[in-house]
């Protein structure tokens, strides 16, 4: 089964992302901060991540930077989901994210992008 | 395009948004307080930065959330507010009263829009006006200000301008040197710091806080001892805040680096588990900003306390209260079923000859005992799951106090204590209105104007203390003000004037609460906006009693007033004493019973208005249920029992025929208007299928409506 880690400091948004990805029949875990995400990444293997940018303690881009510099995490595809506008998308994609989605998002948007990300990986 | 089924997320949206709105209000209050003590802001500066960051994040999250649920006006307004915060972060906008006022107004409007989502009738507030004034603010303040100006003004306001510049530059250089020097041994960390991070570290250092770099390497050995990064993080934020977290890669392992700003030194345990680099130790020469005066430090300590719950860890899940209610309902049914089995087993036991007791029966009894304990544990666990901190109510008060004091030109210091005391979620919700009313009353009627206070030899600012503590299986909430107190003479005059009291009746502390809570009573001639219409106290007392609480009042003229609310922790399952009167059984909640005595009928003294019993040198009023409920009276002079309750130093006892047992009962609300009367707390099922009334004994014994009850 595909394992996905949802990283966002808003529990409501996490629930919405989870609901959007439900058709994938994946197993989900959630993290509310960057540090918590790293902790969960160390404890378990994940096939894909969704990542918020503005979080307490650690910015999403810092986390991306960390992931891309770590052998075990480098290849996990990351979908950045953020309220920041398109202006940031270049920076985020340069930092190693596979896709970039701006809130408000629709369930299909998330699902299709995730599907593509997972397909591309295999 | 497929859309979200909105109704699935409305509850989550409302809850999360309201948490953010509340945290915004708290943070704004703290910022506002810091304005009035500007020349002492130095120490608080790093806290100020983290408060502004928090505010920014809250508005940012609100923007995202509102967009997701399609609340365009809320999305737009949060976006504007976020812009204001960004300007402040970038030091392009200076915080003054105007900025704070606009942010408060915007938050209020935002709250209105958010609340309107669930109410199709409600008209969402218009954002045109507030948007205009925020935009004006952004335009007006857009003058180039040097990035460090706030820091400079804040930390060194007691030094003249030219000196300050010099001192600042020197010490900033020094600070940068010391930070760099300490970091030279940790180049991997140094490389991750950008200019903005460095600014934050410098500000924290300058503010007089203790600054540390903590590097933690997780290991299975540490994890086995319960030492992991989350636990460490909780320890670090207990008396401070994390300015920055950096995960580091070291070959195949990962380390976490935290920059921490703290008011207290790092606990020793942390030194044992992690590498701790203090930034202050060997650098004694830098200029120390003057120590902040006590109240301000307290304000910011509180800020640190607020921070923790605003980023709840995701090991917790949100559960609808309805679902917990359902679990509790099923559990309640289980308690009833257990009672049924108990009854049957007892009957079975009676039929079995003692000597013929068989092993399986004894086993059955033992198993039942075990099940009893399991059920108790389960009940305790579910009850714990429903518990929330009192802060959910208390946190509404600072904003209310701010509004009231501004409108009434009074000064009030609100002190909250015991906010972490846990209480049932339902109780918390029903406590808010009564407590809010008491707080409004305290400010309107209790606390004097600054001029009056100074004339009376008191400090200009009044104190209002709101405190919650455990008291056995109940919770005690106290609200104390140091205002003018209640003038009993004035209350009496007014009461006589209104025809509530005869001239020869006296007011003492026992009936004071009754009088001031009588419908229509108000000593203020002009009704204030917040309080003074004379309908409040009556409702307060009704509300408190409806959730099984009691309320007491103590007031000293010229010194102040204290309200004491004693509340059960939860409502749904109670320990009760089952009593029999005539052929009927009743349940009496144990928490309301002071003592149970045996009554010798020979000692009863009959007087005109009833019956008394000498009891420890004082007369005890006896009240018979048979009289209250107009039941056939058993005239036989047999021994009976008295259930004693006390209320504001009055003692009375309810006379019952027999004490049946003590047990857990499940409270069911009584909806039938014929039965739902004062004095009836609810109904329960004892397991034999018969409904039994749960009595609210204090209400039965002390309520003034007893006479009416007797006549009805």
Image (cartoon, coloured by chain):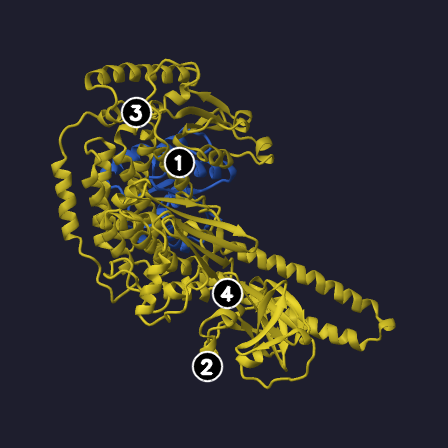
Which comes before the other along the chain, label 3 or label 4? 3
Tell me the subunit letter for badge 2: B
Which comes before the other along the chain, label 1 or label 4? 1
Marks 2 and 3: CB-CB under 8 Å? no
Q: Residue sitting at 75 percent across and 63 percent down?
A: B366
Q: Disc 3 on helix, strand or loop? A: helix
Q: Quadrant of residue B220?
A: top right
Drawing shade for chain B: yellow
Marks 3 and 1: CB-CB under 8 Å? no
Residue B221 visible here: yes
Could you say which disc has been placed on residue B674 in the image?
2
Indicate left or right for B449 with B596 as reference.
left
The reply to whether label 3 and label 4 mark residues of one chain is yes
Residue B387 or B61: which is nearer the viewer?
Answer: B387
Q: Which residue is mark 4?
A: B326
Separation of residues labelled 2 and 4 (CA atoms): 27 Å
Separation of residues labelled 2 and 1 (CA atoms): 53 Å
Q: Which residue is mark 1?
A: B301
The reply to whether label 1 and label 4 mark residues of one chain is yes
Which comes before the other along the chain, label 2 or label 4? 4
Tell us which disc is closer to us: 1 or 4: 1
Could you say which disc has been placed on residue B23 in the image?
none
Tell me the subunit letter for badge 3: B
Q: Disc 1 on helix, strand or loop? A: helix
Q: Residue sitting at 43 percent across and 36 percent down?
A: A35
Q: Residue sitting at 52 percent across and 77 percent down?
A: B609
The reply to whether label 2 and label 1 mark residues of one chain is yes
Drawing shade for chain A: blue
Q: Which residue is mark 3?
A: B199
Marks 2 and 1: CB-CB under 8 Å? no
Which comes before the other along the chain, label 3 or label 1? 3
Tell me the subunit letter for badge 4: B
């Amino acid at each position: 089964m595909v394992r996905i880690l949802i990283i966002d400091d808003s529990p409501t948004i996490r629930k919405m992302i989870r609901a959007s990805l439900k058709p994938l029949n994946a197993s989900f875990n959630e993290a509310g901060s960057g540090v918590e995400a790293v902790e969960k990444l160390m404890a378990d293997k994940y096939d894909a991540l969704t990542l918020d940018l503005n979080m307490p303690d650690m910015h999403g881009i810092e986390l991306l930077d960390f992931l891309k510099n770590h052998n075990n995490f480098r290849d996990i595809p990351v979908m950045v989901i953020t309220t920041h506008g398109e202006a940031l998308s270049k920076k985020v994609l340069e930092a190693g994210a596979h896709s970039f989605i701006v809130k408000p998002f629709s369930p299909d948007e998330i699902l299709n992008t995730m599907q593509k990300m997972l397909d591309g990986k295999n | 395009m497929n859309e979200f089924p909105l109704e699935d997320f409305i509850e989550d949206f409302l809850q999360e948004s309201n948490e953010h709105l509340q945290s915004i209000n708290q943070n704004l209050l703290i910022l506002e307080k810091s304005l009035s003590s500007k020349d002492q802001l130095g120490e608080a500066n790093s806290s100020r930065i983290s408060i502004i960051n928090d505010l920014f994040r809250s508005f940012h999250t609100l923007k995202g959330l509102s967009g997701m649920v399609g609340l365009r006006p809320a999305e737009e307004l949060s976006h504007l507010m976020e812009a204001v915060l960004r300007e402040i972060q970038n030091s392009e906008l200076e915080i003054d009263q105007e900025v704070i006022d606009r942010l408060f107004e915007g938050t209020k409007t935002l709250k209105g829009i958010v609340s309107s989502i669930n109410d199709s009738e409600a008209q969402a507030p218009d954002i045109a006006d507030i948007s205009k004034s925020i935009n004006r603010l952004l335009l007006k303040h857009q003058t180039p200000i040097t990035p460090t100006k706030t820091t400079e003004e804040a930390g060194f306001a007691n030094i003249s301008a030219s000196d300050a510049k010099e001192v600042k530059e020197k010490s900033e250089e020094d600070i940068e040197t010391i930070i760099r020097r300490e970091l030279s041994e940790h180049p991997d960390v140094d490389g991750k710091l950008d200019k903005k991070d460095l600014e934050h570290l410098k500000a924290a250092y300058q503010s007089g806080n203790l600054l540390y770099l903590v590097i933690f390497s997780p290991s299975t050995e540490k994890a086995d001892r319960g030492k992991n990064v989350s636990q460490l993080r909780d320890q670090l934020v207990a008396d401070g805040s994390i300015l920055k977290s950096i995960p580091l890669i070291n070959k195949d392992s990962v380390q976490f680096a935290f920059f921490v700003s703290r008011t207290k030194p790092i606990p020793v345990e942390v030194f044992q588990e992690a590498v701790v680099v203090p930034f202050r130790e060997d650098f004694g020469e830098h200029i120390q900003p003057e120590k902040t005066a006590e109240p301000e430090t307290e304000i910011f300590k509180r800020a640190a306390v607020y921070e923790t719950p605003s980023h709840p860890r995701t090991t917790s899940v949100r559960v609808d209260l309805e679902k917990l209610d359902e679990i509790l309902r099923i559990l309640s049914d289980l308690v009833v079923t257990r009672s049924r089995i108990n009854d049957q087993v007892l009957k079975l036991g009676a039929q079995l000859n003692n000597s013929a007791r068989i092993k399986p029966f004894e086993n059955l009894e033992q198993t039942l005992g075990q099940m009893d304990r399991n059920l108790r544990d389960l009940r305790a666990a579910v009850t714990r799951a429903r518990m929330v901190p009192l802060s959910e109510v208390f946190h509404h008060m600072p904003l209310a106090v701010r509004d009231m004091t501004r409108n009434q030109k009074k000064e009030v210091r609100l002190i909250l204590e015991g906010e972490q005391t846990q209480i049932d979620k339902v109780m918390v919700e029903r406590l808010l209105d009564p407590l809010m009313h008491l707080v409004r009353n305290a400010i309107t009627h209790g606390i004097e104007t600054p001029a009056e206070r100074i004339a009376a030899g008191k400090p200009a600012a009044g104190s209002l203390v709101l405190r919650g503590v455990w008291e056995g299986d109940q919770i005690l909430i106290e609200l104390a003000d140091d205002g003018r107190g209640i003038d009993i003479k004035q209350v009496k005059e007014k009461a006589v004037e209104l025809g509530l009291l005869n001239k020869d009746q006296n007011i003492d502390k026992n009936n004071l609460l009754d009088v001031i809570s009588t419908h229509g009573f108000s000593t203020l001639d002009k009704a204030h906006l917040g309080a003074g219409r004379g309908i409040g106290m009556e409702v307060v007392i009704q509300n408190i009693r409806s959730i099984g609480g009691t309320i007491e009042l103590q007031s000293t003229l010229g010194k102040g007033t204290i309200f004491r609310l004693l509340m059960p922790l939860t409502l749904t399952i109670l320990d009760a004493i089952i009593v029999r009167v005539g052929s009927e059984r009743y349940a009496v909640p144990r928490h309301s019973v002071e003592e149970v005595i045996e009554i010798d009928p020979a000692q009863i003294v009959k007087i005109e208005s009833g019956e008394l019993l000498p009891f420890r040198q004082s007369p005890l009023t006896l009240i018979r249920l048979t009289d209250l409920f107009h039941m056939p009276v058993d005239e036989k002079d047999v021994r009976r029992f008295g259930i004693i309750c006390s209320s504001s130093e009055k003692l009375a006892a309810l006379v019952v025929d027999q004490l049946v047992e003590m047990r857990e009962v499940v409270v069911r609300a009584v909806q039938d208007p014929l039965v739902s009367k004062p004095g009836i707390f609810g109904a329960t099922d004892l397991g034999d299928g018969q409904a039994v009334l749960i009595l609210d004994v204090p209400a039965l014994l002390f309520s003034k409506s007893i006479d009416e009850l007797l006549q009805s």
